Structures are given as C-alpha cells and as structure tokens.
Amino acid sequence: MDAVACATFARTWNETVAVHASETFLVFEGSTNDVTQWTYEEFDRIVDSTAAALEEAGVAPGSAVHVVLKNCPAFVAVWLAAARIGATAIFADPASSARDIAMHIRRTTPTVALCGSRNADTYLQGIKRASDEGVGPALDIGLIVLKEDSIDVLPGSLLVSRDRLPRLVDEPGPHDRLAVMFTSGTTSEPKAVVLTQCNYAHVAQAMAKAADLRPGDRWLVTLPLFHANAQYYCFAPAIAVGASVALTHTFSASQWGKQAARLEATHASLFAAPIRMILARRPEDTPQLNLRHVWFAQSLAPGHFDEFASMVGCAPRQLYGMTETVAMVTAERREDASPVFIGNPSDAGRRTAIVDPHSLEPVETETPGLLLVAGTPGCDLFAEYLSDQKATSAALLEEGGETWLRTGDLVVSDQDGRLRFVGRVDDVIKVSGENVSLTEVEAALAQAPGVLEVAVVPRPDPIRDVVPVAYVVARNVEPPLDIDELTAWASNNLPPQACPRDWHQVAELPRTSVGKIRRSQLRCEDA
C-alpha cells in the first residue's frame, strides 16, 4: 500500500510504454466490424497529441474535461491525456439528456467537452440550459465533436497532429484529482465520486494481481467505458502489466461469443444481466471459447453460472466492489468459484466489518449485516463526493483513527469468513417478519422456464406488511408466459414469503447503462 501511495496513473502508463513499447495495447472493433490496433508506443504518441490538443483548447493542470463519448479509441486517449496533463476527466453516460449535461456542467465547470456527432445537439442544449440556470462559464466550454470511431485518432484528426506536442509540465501528484464518476443512481442528483491519480495506480496493480494478468493476455471490453468496471477491472490492470484490451463500440448479446473468439480475448468482465442476455441470444454457431479468466458481479443463478462456464471455458469468478471501493473488496478464488459466494476479503487484502445497519455494532456469523470497508481515501478508497461534504461524511466513518466506508450493502459471513451478497439495504424487505432479499429472488426467478430476466419490487400489504411483486421479461415473445405456471414454479423453488404475490409481463426492464435495474421506476408503476 505504501509503495502505491506514492504512485500516479500517469507514471504507471509511462513506465509500461517504456517496457512494452512494441507490444499491442488496444484493439478496437468499430460499428462496421472493422478492426484497428495500436502498440503501446503508437498509442502513446496519440496520447501526446491529444494532450496537446486539449492544452490548445485551454486545458491545464486542474482543469475539468467532460467526456461524453461511447466506447471508442478517443475515450481512452482523452483519459490518458488528462492523466498526463494533471487534468480531471469527468466521465458521463453518452446517452445523457440535456438536463443531465446541464447538471454535470453546473457541478464540474468543464473547460472542454468531447461528444459524438450523434449527441452534439443534445450537448449544445445542455450548455444552453446550464447558461439559463446561471452557470456563467457554460458558454465558454470548448466543444470537440468526434466520430467515435478509429478515425478520431488517425493523423490529421481533431486530436492528432504530427507536429503537435504537449507543453512540458510537472508530473501530477498522487493525490491530484484524475476523474469524477457519477453514480448510476435514480435520483436527479447522483453523487459525483472523486478519484485520484493514486486511486487508479492502486487499482491497476491490485486488479492485475487478482486476475493473474500477464503481458500476453487480452481483456474483452464490451461494457461502457464511462463506468468503473471497464476502467478499474480491465483497462487499468492491462496498463499495469503491459497486457492488451480488445474494445468494442457497444455490447451485443448475440455477438459477444463471436467477438471474444475473433478478437482473441483471454479475459472478460461482465455483470449478471448481460450474461443472462448472452446465454439467451447467442446463435447456434457461436464458437466454444477458451478464456482464462472471467469476472462477474451481481447475482447469477446456479444454472446460468454453469451454462456460462461451459460456454467460456472457465468458471467465472464472482467479485464485489463499488466505484467508491476502487479495487474489489472480495472475489472468489479460482478453485472455489461459485455463484453463491463473493469471496473472502482477506484474499483481496481488504479489511472489512459486518455490522448492524442502525447501531453499527458487529453482528454474529451467518447474520446479515451492513458491510464496512477500511481504507485510505484517495488511495484504496475514493477521495470524496464532489462538493458534498455531508454525503462524504455519511459514507466515510472515522473510528479509532481509521476510515471505514459504509457500503450500503448487506452481506452474510460463514464460519470461514467467506461472504454472500444479500442486497442493498433498501432491497431487503420483511414479509410477515421474514427477511426477503429481492436480489436473491430475482436470480432464482430468472431460471424459471420461459423467463429471460426479472425485477422484483415490494408492495405494501395490509396483512403481511409488504409483499414481493415480479416484473418478468419473456425469453420469447410468443407464446406469452403462463402466470399459473410461474406461480407454481416459484412455490416449488422459493420459500413461501419470497414468492411473488403478483406478476406483470413486460417487454423490457428499466435499467441504467450498465444493466442495473431501476427498481424505483417499477415501484412507481406498482403504487
């Protein structure tokens, strides 16, 4: 920890470029399936030119750069250029509305913004909205509009010029701000997680070690780059050891297996929802894969776990982490991989406590409790919530001279210290006095015949206080799901208190950009 505390992500990149200059860094598959690749040395020249382009647009150490891009090489170049300059990359969902963009501008006051031609009008509307709301600097933002394809980083593009180099500046410090990520909450004002150079240097080393990553390995990244999963678990560790990344412009459930084979991936990281989609939509000619390592997060039912393990050629390892924890807190060991447990924190070198959510007193083994994670803000924990001391103080508890992150998640520990994820504090309900994890019910119901995915929400009940209600997406449009059959299946596979009291068949579930269910929207519908 002490060695990493002095490190910066900028230095991590520079050192890897020096050692692995001629080795492949990035392979990008665009929207027309064209593939372009760059070595570390080649991409470093792109980073230099991009840094110079940002400087010409007014970016200096400490400036904010608003990145509202889909998966593309320019996203990676801007991220690394910001690290080199000492600027802050403000990562945003490329599907952000004008309202979202105005909120980002108000809270971060970017000097420069980058977006795609497809959402340039939306960004301009966001600028106008921010200006109308009294954000004076909004009209001064330098907007760089890109194609979100390989052409953005070819010579002669807006970012890359052969005769343009960045000014020489002092290397940024370990605790200088490098990024801000907005949490994928359902409120109008999501928290803005501040991350430092040290945070990224730490996660690069920690996650490379956890995945046993080697220079010849290759990550397949299909999830959105603006999210922590792709940055923390894939790109940063690849950079730490000189491995490569195969990046796709978007996620395709039907093509994921073919992409993994075609792009010669050895490693992948996914959430449970995309895994279920892959299993449901993969064509018959999907090749057998031989991946060496797969991370997954969020609950996956045993049947889906086994089916996906057979498809990819290795047992996927469940991990647990948050944007705020930076590196993972727990992960299953390769030899113990299962869909039931998320691992032992000691295997990940993390210190945790499981406490009563209200009293914060330790709970007994096999008792659900709130997970606390010890660490150092700005190194192995996030630095703070941007301009929100109240939220920061609520999340980071000071106890006995140590800092503990209140995760908001409930877990259960067995006698050996192996943890099982129960759900968010708000996603565990009491039905007639019995605890029911909505997350666990969803994972179970996703295995029911004819079901693709499920969301379960609570509904007030005059007798049982609250009961679960299920929203179900069918695997096939026809024939429609038989609710009586679903009810019977649930009765045979779930405890009585966990069985849904009502069912709704829907075409799709409301989700965030990385697949998390927006239960609050379903709660409103069921009210």
Image (spheres, rainbow, N blue to C red):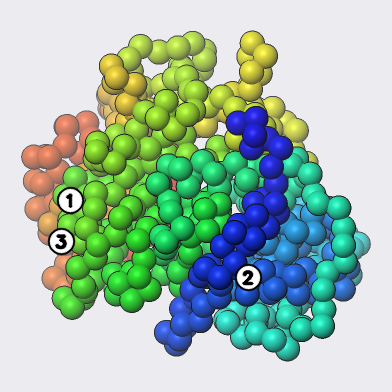
Name the foreground residue: 425 vs 342. Answer: 342
CA separation in Å, label 2 and label 3: 50 Å
Q: Which residue is mark 3?
A: 450
Residue found 22% across the figure and 46% down from its top: 301
Point out the tag, 2 or 3, that comes first from the N-terminus. 2
In percent of width and height, residue 525 lies at 41, 53
Q: Nearer the viewer, mark 2 or mark 1?
A: 2
Q: Which residue is mark 1?
A: 306
Q: Quadrant of the N terminus?
A: top right
Q: Is residue 521 above or below residue 342?
A: below
Q: Is residue 14 visible?
A: yes
Query: Which residue is labeled 2 in the image?
Result: 41
Q: Which mark is residue 327?
A: none
Disc 2 marks which amino acid? Glu
Looking at the image, residue 479 sits to the left or right of residue 382; the answer is left
Image location (x, y in percent) of residue 126: 74, 69
* Whole-percent x, y for residue 139 in the image: 87, 70
For the point 64% across and 60% down, which residue is it? 18
85 or 269: nearer the eye?
85
Left or right of 249 in this view: 298 = left
Residue type pointed to by label 1: Asp
The kind of secondary structure element at disc 1 is helix
Three-letter code for the amino acid on which mark 3 is drawn = Gly
User: SS for tag 2?
Assistant: helix
**Element type at marker 3?**
loop
Q: Is residue 452 visible?
A: no
